Image: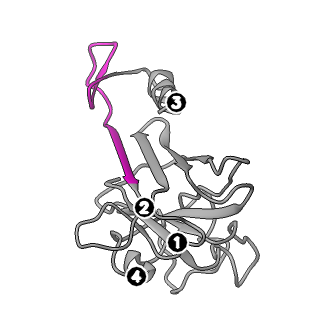
Amino acid sequence: MRFLPKLLSTAFAAGLSVTGLSATSAAAAPAPPLHFTAAHGTFAAYTPGGQAVTYRPDLVPAGAKAHVAALSASRVGTTTVLVISGLLPRHEYGAHAHVNSCGATGDAAGGHFQHVPDPVKPSVDPAYANPHNEIWLDFTTDRSGIGHATSTVDWTFDGRRAKSVVIHETHTHTDPGHAGTAGGRLACLNVGF
């Protein structure tokens, strides 16, 4: 994945070195926590235990591929990269980290993962539904149907973790009463954030 160097450079900027999936500090002091995860899948119709599901093959065709990598470190927050191919050319899509794993319908993934949860559900308040409190990965595909996005937030996951990335039919809205909405749920990729 060509975006992996950006994730690793984030770790190095924080004074960390990465060996496999663990972290060590250049100094003798204990290293801050570092968490790296990567997931990939080829979209297909839902099957129990499937990694990548398409709910709208007219917009996310079976056979399209997605890769997600995320790096969290206490001094730099969380950087997430999405790379996807095989989609419609020159088309706008929304994408967000969601609280549940993928299921037979798009609703199975639950709501967006929020660092500070909105007490009102569904969350459409820009104070909570925004790219600083959620992981937003909106993208527009190129003429070959390839898209990519990067999200950087200043927080890391605690005991709660996102479990999937859902692809939506439009870029994400930011206006009050609609904040965080991005149309229908087209596809889902399980990601163990």
- Mark 2 and mark 3: span between their CA atoms? 21 Å
Q: Could one spot residue 113 in this view of the protein?
A: no
Mark 2 vs 1: CB contact within 8 A: yes
Is residue 99 something one can see in this rendering? yes
Does label 4 or label 1 sit earlier along the sequence?
1
Query: What residue type is disc 1 on?
Result: Pro
Which residue in the structure is indicated by mark 3? Answer: 2
Q: Give the residue displayed 46% in from the left and 21% down from the top.
A: 12
Q: Which mark is residue 105?
A: 4
Magenta stretch bounds:
19-41
Distance, label 3 to label 4, CA atoms, is 31 Å
How far apart marks 2 and 1 lie (CA) works out to: 9 Å
Q: Nearer the viewer, mark 2 or mark 3?
A: 2
Which label is found at residue 57?
A: 1
Q: Across the whole image, how many numbered discs are drawn on residues?
A: 4
Badge 3 or badge 1: first in the primary sequence: 3
Q: Quadrant of residue 26?
A: top left
| Residues marked 4 and 2 touching at CB (< 8 Å) | no
Q: Is residue 136 magenta?
A: no
Nearest to the observer: residue 190 or residue 35: 190
